[in-house]
Amino acid sequence: MTRAAAATPASEPSPARALAARYRAVRAATDALRRPLSAEDCALQSMPDASPTKWHLAHTTWFFETFLLERAERGFRPFDASFRVLFNSYYNAVGPQHARPARGILSRPGLDEVLRYRAAVDERVLAWLERDGEAHPLLPVVELGLQHEQQHQELILTDLKHAFAQSPLRPAYRALPEPPPAAAPPLRFERFEEGVRWIGHAGGGFAFDNEGPRHRVLLPAFELASRCATNGEYLAFVADGGYRRPELWLSDAWAWREAESIEAPLYWRRDGDAWTTLTLGGVRELRPEEPVTHLSFYEAAAFAEWSGARLPTEFEWEVAAHGVPVEGNFVESDRLHPAPAADGSGLAQLFGDVWEWTRSDYAPYPGFAPAAGALGEYNGKFMCNQRVLRGGSCATPAGHVRASYRNFFPPSARWQFSGLRLARDV
């Protein structure tokens, strides 16, 4: 029996129909990301932290099949029972998983079979939304699955870029538009006064569980840089021996730098007196006005120390971002690379361009409790040995982030579009 739907104005789609339209759009955006790639490209895995594009395509589909269709369809039958293990990422409550570092050895199923899997699950999800979706308690799972897929859209690009960087050919994902000449505006600092501030998601709209509960914090006065740090500013740090001065580095950071022989941001290469960097459009000369990216937390913190500043806390960042329109250089801009800040008043680049490292540990907010069941594993169990990043990047889908959004990675991670914004005590 079809569930009764609440009355909606004739000019507005019902919640299920609106979600179906969004489902089609998000799934199509993922498909568009893989279209410039060959089947061989889609099978690449360059390190344990990255996954092949083919795996991302399958895992995001597995999410809808496992957490929606398995619970919603009467007489549910899986597309392929083996996929339950192959494309489970880390959900222990669902069952065993194929080892993450070995995702790249899965020559089968092939890309064509994964695409058939996506099409079959799409048909079933859309049929369920049309038939049973109105006011159904599982509707929030569809939205969670779409937000999850948007996270994997960004990972498709960053994981592929890392894989292409391992090739001596240094291939391009696709041609990118040539950015117009620009200069970074002078760096300013904006002051924020001491006070008790509200932190966490408030109001309507989607948010992940780690964005709450909303709570208050006491913040001393601080200053925040008007834009992200640039390649030119970071080049000065490199030229001043920043990677050879242990007094600038945290102990764990210096041990990492020495063990990995790190001398510059990921994808930078010295070509005589010039530097080049790898972009998703191929290798090009490093542009000093663009935000520095592909930094670890360790590098960001060392640069901040060298600059006579520090990284902001995630609470400082969120207070500064409160009320700022969520606009910027996101994946839809088609640049797929950070852009120079625009000149003007206020804080630039809070959203888009680069994820901004904060000095905050990824920890639960007061009163946080993960949801019951497998979906409770989505965020909470990673609240250990990670640092928080804020703001989104040039590979993040527009509309996916907000001021309360908390991204997190280990402090050594740098294959994401991660950069920094300086802060200072007052």
Image (spheres, rainbow, N blue to C red):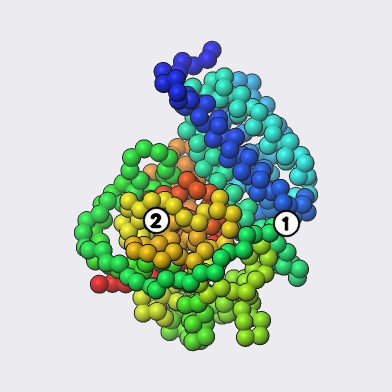
Task: Name the spot of residue 291 as percent of width and height, x first.
Answer: 50, 68
Assign the N terminus to one quadrant of the image: top right
Q: Name the residue at the front extreme.
A: 180
Badge number at residue 44: 1
Q: Can residue 174 be seen in this view?
A: yes
Q: Is residue 253 left or right of residue 66?
A: left
Q: Nearer the viewer, residue 419 or 57?
A: 419
Q: Is residue 366 left or right of residue 60?
A: left
> Mark 1 against mark 2, which lies toward the viewer?
1
Q: Residue at x 67, y 26 (%)?
A: 77
Q: Which amino acid does label 2 sit on?
A: Ala
Q: Which of 195 and 330 is in front in this view?
A: 330
Assign the C terminus to one quadrant of the image: bottom left
Q: Nearer the viewer, residue 331 or 400?
A: 331
Q: Is residue 63 visible?
A: no
Task: Name the spot of residue 55 as percent of width and height, x first.
Answer: 68, 48
Q: What element carries label 2?
A: loop
Q: Which residue is drawn at 68% across and 37% down?
A: 118
Q: Residues within 10 Å of mark 2 (few under 14, many from 20)?
A: some
Q: What residue type is labelled 1?
A: Leu
* Image quarter of residue 190: bottom left
Q: Distance between the residues labelled 1 and 2?
A: 33 Å
According to the picture, the residue beneath numbered tag 2 turns out to be 363
Task: Name the spot of residue 19 as percent of width and height, x first.
Answer: 52, 31
Q: Residues within 10 Å of mark 1 (few under 14, many from 20)?
A: many
> Are circles 1 and 2 on residues that touch, CB within 8 Å?
no
